[in-house]
Image (cartoon, rainbow, N blue to C red):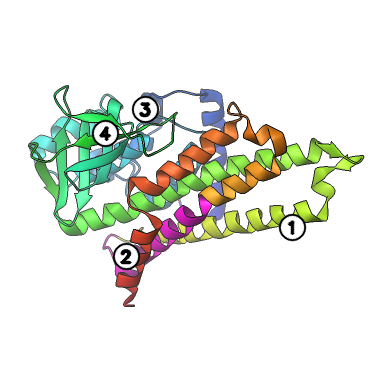
Amino acid sequence: MGQGDADLDLLRAAARDFLTGRGAQDSVKELAAMDWTGLLVEEHFGGSGWRPVETTVIAEELGRAQNCSTWFGCVLSAAALTSAPCEVRDRWLPALLDGAATAGCALSGDTVRVARGDAIDVLVTLGDNGIHLFEISEATSRHRDEELLDVTRTAWRVEVGGAPSVPIGGPQRATQLLAMARVLLSADSLGALSATFERLVDYLKERIAFGVPIASFQAVQHRLVDLLVFEAKARAVIMKAARALVADEIADHAIALSAAAHAYVTAKASAAVDECMQLSGGIGFTWEYPLHHELRRVFTNGYLLGTARSSRALLAERSGW
């Protein structure tokens, strides 16, 4: 599929229809059957080709649908495995592409944060020391990360310090995939916010106060416009970063754009969802309301691959500030 707006709109609509019909499932196999785990894998390895833009659209729709599978880790780990030694690649890449195995992706460290770390077979870490693959077993020490809030797509701390690993890529490839990962996380948060905002607008159109819909009040309209502007800005910077990553060779401007997108969305998405909560009135504060899951999701996304502050520092470094 090309990167024209019409093609991307078709992809977005098809993905939304599929995910709506799929419902709340945590299996990655159906997503693999749609070739969504191979979107960043070159065709001669069995994937769809290096497609950052299309992958970003899928990530946004998965965030919108509150997907709780291991797709994020699988799509990035599959891409990382293309540079792995043949025996490692042949063992794990086909399994990730068809959904038979699952993977997590995290920043390098002795103890790493991983979304759905309880449900992964392998862990891929990205950092200045390159890309490393760890096989996860019952003996691997891991526990729920109580500092993060997502209850549907739980975050885990996995201890890999001293554990045997296989180097599967160099620092440059790790930098490229980290940039892609930041864009995908930002798109996931945008999707969650988009769902929240759409539900809010529908609610305010139906909720009556003083004989008229709440949405007709000017003060409310101003706040809704602010949310709409943020959504539009966030999508623009995310898609610009994704398009910059289409090139085979990683460049400073692509890294800077991915850092800018991550910093901007991470810093503001939680506040935007919280604003939706305030505008929802009493129903927005009930624990059963979907908005709370979306708020927890965007908050957690802001800590899985660094913070807004770390992305600002990276942006400054790559921009020569």
Q: For this view, does 219 lie left or right of residue 104? A: right
Pick out the residue farthest to the right.
211
Give the numbered dot on residue 222.
1
- Compared to residue 248, the image places residue 286 above or below, namely above
Using the numbered discs, state the Cα–Cα distance from disc 3 to disc 4 in whole angstroms: 10 Å
From the image, tell me which residue sits under label 2.
Answer: 314
Please indicate, yes or no, whether residue 57 appears anywhere in the rendered image: no
Across and down, in percent, residue 303 comes to 37, 47
Whether the residues at callouts 2 and 3 have beta carbons within 8 Å, the answer is no
From the image, tell me which residue sits under label 4.
Answer: 103
Give the numbered dot on residue 201.
none
Task: Looking at the image, tell me whether mark 2 or mark 4 is earlier in sequence order.
Answer: 4
Q: For this view, does 10 lie left or right of residue 244? A: right
Q: Residues within 10 Å of mark 1 (few under 14, many from 20)?
A: few
- In terms of secondary structure, where does tag 3 sit? loop
Q: For this view, does 260 lie left or right of residue 317? A: right
From the image, tell me which residue sits under label 3.
Answer: 28
Task: Looking at the image, tell me whether mark 1 or mark 4 is earlier in sequence order.
Answer: 4
The number of numbered discs placed on residues in the rendered structure image is: 4
Closer-to-camera residue (86/77): 77
